[in-house]
Amino acid sequence: MTESAGRRILTLHPGNDLRLQDELLSCVEQVLSDAGATRIWIQASPEDDLRVYAEMPGREDAEVIDLAERASHEGLAEA
């Protein structure tokens, strides 16, 4: 799979706690799915970062998701 086949969405840097990475990736996957992603995948970069890619629908078809609003509804807002 080449980078041009999808759009890079997020980069996670190495050294983060594995549980934190798992939770972040799960949330990102859910948000991308909700936005209509047709495919989501992770690739390691040459720098050992984890890069999240997704194939997204055209801009005119994409639903806009307000992450701050979603976080407050799910109890994830800052304390």
Image (tube, helix red, strand yellow):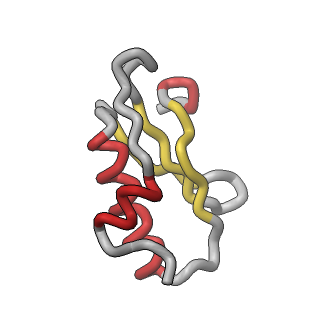
Q: Residue at x 49, y 25 (%)?
A: 5
Q: Residue at x 34, y 19 (%)?
A: 61
Instruction: Give the side of residue 3 with respect to residue 55, left or right.
Output: right
Residue 50, quarter of picture = bottom right
44 versus 23 height, above or below: above
Residue 47, quarter of picture = bottom right
Q: Position of residue 73 (x, y in %)?
A: 30, 64
Q: How many marks?
A: 0
42 versus 22 height, above or below: above
Q: Residue at x 29, y 33 (%)?
A: 36
Q: Residue at x 49, y 84 (%)?
A: 79
Give the camera-side residue of 19 and 27. Answer: 27
48 versus 55 height, above or below: below
Q: Position of residue 25 (x, y in %)?
A: 41, 62
Q: Position of residue 77 (x, y in %)?
A: 44, 72
Give the camera-side residue of 27 and 42. Answer: 27
Q: Position of residue 64 (x, y in %)?
A: 40, 35
Give the camera-side residue of 43 and 71. Answer: 71
